[in-house]
Image (cartoon, rainbow, N blue to C red):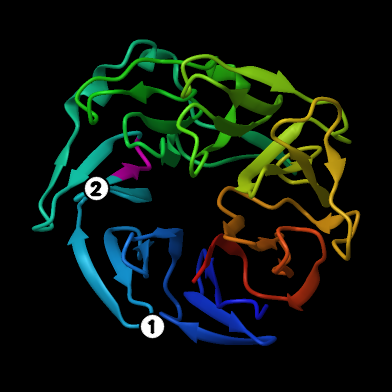
Amino acid sequence: MTMPVVLVATWRNGLFAVTDETARQELSDQPVKSLVADGDGGALAIVGDHSLCRRAFDGGWTTIATSKFDLACCLPVGDRIYVGTNDARVLCVDSDGIHQPLTGFDTVAGRDKWYAGTALINGQLMGPPLGIRSMAATCDDAVLLANVHVGGIPLSSDGGLTWRPTIDIDHDVHQVCAHPTCPDIVIAAAAIGLCISRDSGSTWSTEQEGLHASYCSAVAFSGDALLVAASEDHFAARGAIYRRSLDADGPLQPVGGGMPRWIAGIADTGCIATRGSAVAVVDRAGNLYTSDDAGGTWSNSVSGLPSPSSLFIC
């Protein structure tokens, strides 16, 4: 099988379409983030902080909507696109490009306890803003989940009109991901480990067994298995990718088959992507690892890409 095109979005240098160990740059000198499938063979992304854009399969870009808000992530569900912002709002964009804030999200219980993620680095207080880091919908579109950093995973079962809290906000969740075919299964990467829900995100259990450190930053499903990235903290010099069957008990296992035991820094939110049997992982140093057999074997496609923000497999 030939590995499909992998799109690597970056925080400052546009997007790179990687194929056959070559990387073609698009939207140079612009921040691009939150690559997700558009449901029509292309991808959606946040471009330049305030624009929701679509990339067609042939590489052409169009703007769907612009906003005064600082946009963070997006999620298509049916004929709507839900967009999370860096000030912890959720917008709903319709087929005409009109966007409206979902006011029910502004009144979710416990919102007054949310806080921005921070860390003391070389004497300076650093960290991302309080915002929506990732979003997911169960495969039957019945449940929406918004990963607030730091504010847990509020859940909506009425299309975003009302929301309720689920996981403890101090678990410090970095990504939430819904299973592509089973509506009950949702996973999340959190600072306390891998979080798993078997009731569409209503309740959660946490696992750490097998991980070298508990700080998890990205998750994805690949066939009948899950993948999770772990490191000592957000600024760790090295991280690792782990795998386990969804039906198995016991420890998570480091991914082998050509994937290095230690990657350069973390694989951050959205930096593990899957599509069928194709899998891609990019680390903080811009090293892209790809697999065409559901993570059994890996190759290092390209190295040294600019600081990556997310991945998508065409």
Of the residues shown, which amino acid type is indicated by label 1? Gly
Instruction: Label 2: state its secondary structure.
Output: loop
Q: Position of residue 286 (x, y in %)?
A: 69, 69
Picture coordinates of residue 213, whole percent (x, y)? 84, 33
Mark 1: few, some, or many residues within 10 Å (few <14, many ≥20)?
Answer: few
Pointer 1 residue: 59
For the point 66% across and 61% down, which residue is it? 279
Where is residue 195, by image quadrant? top right
Residue 54 at x, y percent in the picture: 30, 68
On whether residue 86 falls in the magenta region, the answer is yes
Say above or below: 188 vs 254.
above
197 sits to left or right of 32: right
Could you tell which of marks 1 and 2 lies nearer the N-terminus? 1
Q: Would you say the residues marked 1 and 2 are in contact, meaning their CB atoms lie under 8 Å apart?
A: no
Q: Which residues are magenta?
A: 83-87
Q: Is residue 158 above or below residue 136?
A: above
Which quarter of the figure has residue 256? bottom right
